[in-house]
Structure formats: structure tokens, C-alpha cells
């Protein structure tokens, strides 16, 4: 987890430069600002940056409500990104108690490379076989060649033309036996089927996966 937290810190510093440029240009509603805030909202607390996550969620909500962030919102996020010091207490990634696991194969679809690495590491530690992809169209191009998969774990917001819901529909059409667990860092109302909110810790991931698979570990 420490290695992922440091990778996150380095990415956060790059995000700081990007957001500063948009603030300087008074371009607060840019797509890059929305994408950056959305990713930070979904992962910052997980990697030890709870303050960054809180500030990013405020901005992400402004976009999801159909508006744009204000300058004070961006400046709060910039201040917290500039500190870029992980909170060690928050960075404790795993609970001390045992989490339910299994031996099924899970297809993880997540465009954030750090969250994808975190999910893969956590699921493998729980005993699962894991296949990873970064986008929905990538999955559909590979699906017929993949081994049997019991669960699709996908972000609702994916790059490209194939979003999470569309991906799930097509995967289930081709392989009806595959169950689905959705995730997102954005408030999505009533998501279809099983849902796990970001940021998620390993115990929540473990429970969500077992629930979606429809079984529990003795």
C-alpha cells in the first residue's frame, strides 16, 4: 500500500500543476478539471489523503449537479494538493479482522491505474483470480478469448463509448452467467444491481464481491 500511496502523491503533484493552470486561465469548468476532481474524489482518502478527497468531492458534486466549481472550491483543493503529505492513520489500508474471500475469477474494469492496482492486489490477497482492463471497449474486444469469469467489477464511468452500464449489459448478453458489481466515486442515485461506493477499503470490497456473487464464506 505504501508504494501505491507514493505513486498517488506523485500524481497529485502533477494534478496540482494542471489545476493551477486552469485556475490561472479562469477555466474552472474545463473537462480536465472535472476528470481530475472525479479521480481524486474516488481514490484520495484510500491512499492517505482524506483532505484532498473531501475537497475533490465538493468539486465533483458541482459538476454532477450540472454546474461548475467556484474559485474558492478550486483554491481549497489546490491548498490541500500542495501539502501532498499522506495521513498515516488513513493510509492503513487493511482491517485487522479476516475478510471473506473466494477462488472465483473476477474481471476488474477501472480506468484509474492506481485504483485498478489496489483492487487487483486486494482481490488476489483474498484468493481470487483477477483479470484487469482499463476500458469497456477493451473488454468487449477480448471477451470471447477470456477464461470463465464469475464476476464483472466495473466502474460506472469509463473512457470511450462503452460506459459501465453498457458494458455490463453486453457482457451479460454474451455471458449470462457473469454477475456484476458496479462502483463509482460519484453520487449515482439508484445504480443498477450491486454497488460499491468509492473510495472502498478491502473489507468493503470483500463483502461487496461476496454479496454480488451470491454466496458467503463459512
Image (cartoon, helix red, strand yellow):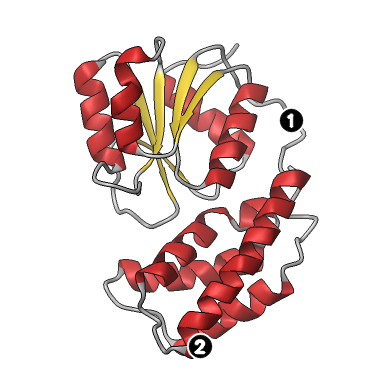
Residue 90 vs residue 98, the one in the foreground: 90
Asked if labels 1 and 2 touch by Cβ distance under 8 angstroms, the answer is no
Residue 207, x across and y down, in percent: 54, 30
- Say left or right for 137 vs 128: left
The residue that disc 1 covers is 97
Residue 67, x across and y down, in percent: 30, 77
Residue 32 vs residue 166, the one in the foreground: 32
Residue visible at 26% across and 41% down in the picture? 162
Q: Earlier in the sequence, mark 2 or mark 1?
A: 2
Residue 111 lies, with reference to residue 97, above or below; the image says below
- Quarter of the picture containing the C terminus is top right
- Quarter of the picture containing the N terminus is top right
Residue 153, x across and y down, in percent: 42, 31
Q: CA distance from mark 2 to mark 1?
A: 41 Å
- Say left or right for 81 vs 185: right
The residue that disc 2 covers is 72
Residue visible at 48% across and 85% down in the picture? 23
Residue visible at 46% across and 81% down in the picture? 22
Callout 1 environment at 10 Å: few (<14), some (14 to 19), or many (20+)? few
Between tags 2 and 1, which lies in front? 2
Residue 102, x across and y down, in percent: 57, 15
Residue visible at 45% across and 45% down in the picture? 111
Amino acid at each position: 500500500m505504501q508504494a501505491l500511496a507514493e505513486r498517488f502523491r506523485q500524481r497529485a503533484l502533477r494534478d496540482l500543476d494542471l489545476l493551477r493552470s486552469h485556475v490561472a486561465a479562469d477555466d474552472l469548468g474545463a473537462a480536465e478539471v472535472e476528470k481530475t476532481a472525479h479521480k481524486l474524489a474516488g481514490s484520495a482518502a484510500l491512499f492517505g489523503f482524506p483532505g484532498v478527497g473531501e475537497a475533490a468531492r465538493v468539486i465533483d458534486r458541482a459538476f454532477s449537479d450540472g454546474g461548475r466549481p467556484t474559485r474558492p472550491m478550486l483554491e481549497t483543493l489546490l491548498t490541500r494538493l500542495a501539502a501532498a503529505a499522506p495521513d498515516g492513520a488513513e493510509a492503513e489500508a487493511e482491517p485487522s479482522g479476516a475478510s471473506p474471500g473466494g477462488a472465483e475469477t473476477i474481471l476488474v474494469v477501472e480506468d484509474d491505474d492506481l485504483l485498478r492496482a489496489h483492487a487487483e492486489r486486494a482481490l488476489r490477497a483474498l484468493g481470487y483470480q483477477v483479470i484487469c482492463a482499463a476500458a469497456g471497449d477493451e473488454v468487449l474486444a477480448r471477451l470471447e478469448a477470456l477464461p470463465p469469469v464469475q464476476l464483472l467489477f466495473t466502474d460506472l464511468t469509463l473512457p470511450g463509448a462503452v460506459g459501465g452500464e453498457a458494458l455490463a449489459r453486453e457482457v451479460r448478453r454474451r455471458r449470462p452467467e457473469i454477475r456484476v458489481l458496479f462502483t463509482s466515486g460519484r453520487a449515482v442515485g439508484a445504480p443498477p444491481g450491486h454497488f460499491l461506493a468509492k473510495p472502498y477499503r478491502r473489507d468493503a470490497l470483500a463483502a461487496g464481491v461476496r454479496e454480488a456473487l451470491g454466496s458467503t464464506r463459512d
